[in-house]
Image (spheres, rainbow, N blue to C red):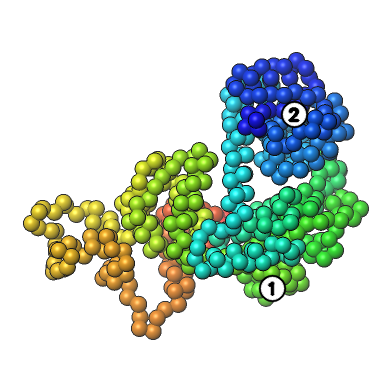
Amino acid sequence: MAESRILILDANEERAETLRGLLQFIDYQPVRMESCGQIAASGAKPADWLAVIVGKLLDPAALPAFVDWLKRDHLHPPLLLLPEHHAQGAARFELHESACLPIDYPVKYAQLNEVLKRAGLTRMERETAEQVASRGPTGNSPAIRRVRRMIEQVAGFDTTVLITGESGTGKEVVARAIHCQSPRKDKPFVAVNCGAIPAELLESELFGHEKGAFTGAITARKGRFELADGGTLFLDEIGDMSLPMQVKILRALQERSFERVGGTRSQRCDVRVIAATHRNLEEGIVKGSFREDLYYRLNVFPIETPPLRERLEDLPLLLEDLIGQLERSGRGSVRLAPEAINLLRGYHWPGNVRELSNLVERLAVLHPGAVVRPQDLPARYRPAQLDSVAELPEPGADELPVPANEPMPVSMAGESAVLRDLRMPSLSATTRSEPLLPPAGVDLKDHIEHIESSLIRQALAQSGGVVAHAAKLLNTRRTTLVEKLRKYGLQREDSEVSSAGELG
């Protein structure tokens, strides 16, 4: 069975026998082969194995065919690389780093056992991710139903798609759903975060390089365009790409060909390109940071992912889905009381679904297997009146605590207004502690951004301009705060912050 079968690909007979004995001892089913060529002759499939241990190869020239065999299944087993492959690692096998795990020899039992457990979890997570991706974003709100309809409409074509939306709204989920519902679903889905790779390395990452193209290029290497051949290439955060790189991407999209760094031969590529960004590319065109011709090349079929605050009716389904993912990956479990979910509906979710996912994982660590009540939520997700209720003394049978200089509210059999509002969240919008809506109304987005910007400024002032300390005050990640600073232009206005190098 694939759940326990391990392929040992090693011509070193003594080492292979040692590995086989150890694997049998820990209840795995090892099968040894001496060369890559034996795999094709055996009629095996990549899905037949939980992992492949790679050591000495009798036929190194057959390595490309072995890699192609693996890539028949985009959920192929990871490679466990013995010491002779550690130096080159994943580059030699032209696979992603997460698919190539080093192991020592003489083998360490704890290391091998841990790596094999990780291989099993990785397989389960990837299978689960594919199942989730095939159905698209979670939810039943009108906004999400509209996104799913657009996915179904475009999936069957090779049309270039541009996905826009705030950070954390699930743009990659949409991209994977398009791929999984397309005729290319059995081919690779390769994702590249264009904003996370330095500009000077991005060309090599996308197009590959020839041996000796630059210092450190000790072997030729395929780029993401080649690895995605026949499948889908997802260019995430394309709005962060440098202008020189935009020119090269535009050429690759127009001509469906490219050259490796240091190479002279033009190569054809059969890939479907999906791009995503949280930036306003039209504003980038005006500012000169994004090419207009590339924008129109990408924006053939636009899809906008809605922020979580605009689809709060999906919150219970999202929580159920995220908790299920935690349980399947063995990272614990947790449940939320209905009252806690109602409180979360009142939060503005600047980090969107990614923030919700982080909250669920945090609660699973703090309250493993328990039911989370409103008072168990982190402070930023609780209204101020909830903390004040927690500090009130327990009332007697015939008396209730009355705040000083305030009359007792007469309703609901004598319950206090605060307790009544906690039991009935739908009424809490009218409590005196919340701001009143002006008769003329407000621009909600601008109002929230004004509050957010003000709190960020206060946190920076309290922390002396140190972004890492300000992020702790705001209970957010440093990288998230840096993005907010850029969004509101605070790094230009608060010179003491930018001069400290905190935004780098």
Q: Is residue 379 above or below residue 114?
A: below
Looking at the image, the residue that sits furthest to the bottom is 440
Residue 257 drawn at (x, y percent)? 85, 58
Q: Is residue 203 above or below residue 210?
A: below
Residue 130 drawn at (x, y percent)? 62, 49
Q: Quadrant of the image for the C terminus?
A: bottom right
Quarter of the image holding residue 49? top right
Q: Is residue 470 above or below residue 304?
A: above
Using the image as rendered, state which of residue 37 and residue 451 is in the foreground.
37
Residue 473 drawn at (x, y percent)? 41, 54
Residue linked to disc 1: 285
Residue 240 located left or right of residue 84: left
Using the image as rendered, state which of residue 59 and residue 499 is in the foreground.
59
Residue at 71%, 45% in the rendered image: 74
Quarter of the image holding residue 420? bottom left
- N-terminal label among 1 and 2: 2
Residue at 79%, 52% in the rendered image: 229
Q: Quadrant of the image for the N terminus?
A: top right
Residue at 16%, 52% in the rendered image: 393
Residue 208 located left or right of residue 390: right
Using the image as rendered, state which of residue 203 and residue 352 is in the foreground.
352
Residue at 64%, 73% in the rendered image: 283
The answer, for residue 242, to whether it is visible in the render is no
Using the image as rendered, state which of residue 473 and residue 83 is in the foreground.
83
Residue linked to disc 2: 54
Secondary structure state at the residue bearing disc 1:
helix
Report if the CB atoms under discs 1 and 2 are less than 8 Å apart.
Answer: no
Amino acid residing under circle 1 = Ile
Q: Nearer the viewer, mark 1 or mark 2?
A: 2
Q: CA distance from mark 1 to mark 2?
A: 49 Å
